[in-house]
Image: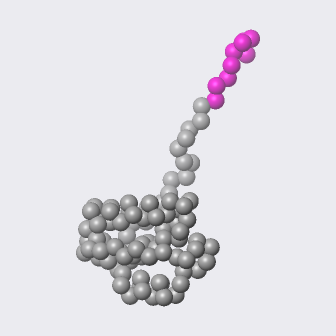
Amino acid sequence: MAEGARIIQILDPRAEDVPQELGLSPTLSSLKGKVIGLLENRKYHADAFLQELQNVLVDDYGAKKVIYATKFTYSAACAQETLDSLSQECDAVIHGIAD
């Protein structure tokens, strides 16, 4: 290498792994007209993420209603009453985890 020459390393910021897209369950082919439950784990920013997701589910995917529930704390299991309520009222439930 010539004197005074420097090496510059360029890093690619993209993720190395490409996640597999699974799509919707065969038993739930569309969200249109469905009741969707959002279960927040109370971690930092989970509420902001799920509130935005709620708008997307209703405005972009036609969900009829979104039911929002929270766990007592992220480190404990969800209360059985909350799970029972969501499973009775909702066609699908999304458990949001954020940090």
Predominant SS along the magenta part = loop
Q: Is residue 69 above or below residue 89?
A: above
Q: How is the image coloured?
A: one colour
Question: Magenta includes 13?
Answer: no
Query: Can see residue 28?
Result: no
Residue 3 vs residue 84, the one in the foreground = 84
Horizontal and vertical percent for residue 53?
38, 63
Residue 12 vs residue 32, the one in the foreground = 32
Residue 11 vs residue 93, the one in the foreground = 93
Instruction: Read off the magenta span.
Output: 1-9
Q: Quadrant of residue 50?
A: bottom left
Count the marks.
0
Q: Is residue 28 left or right of residue 15?
A: left
Horizontal and vertical percent for residue 76?
61, 77
**Residue at horizontal 55 percent and vertical 65 percent from the top:** 43
Residue furthest top in the image: 3
Query: Can see residue 93?
Result: yes
Which corner quadrant holds the N terminus? top right
Horizontal and vertical percent for residue 35?
32, 77
**Residue at horizontal 40 percent and vertical 74 percent from the top:** 68
**Residue at horizontal 44 percent and vertical 60 percent from the top:** 48
Q: Quadrant of residue 91?
A: bottom left
Q: Is residue 18 left or right of residue 2?
A: left
**Residue at horizontal 37 percent and vertical 70 percent from the top:** 24
Q: Quadrant of residue 61?
A: bottom left
Which corner quadrant holds the C terminus? bottom right
Horizontal and vertical percent for residue 65?
29, 74
Question: Magenta includes 3?
Answer: yes
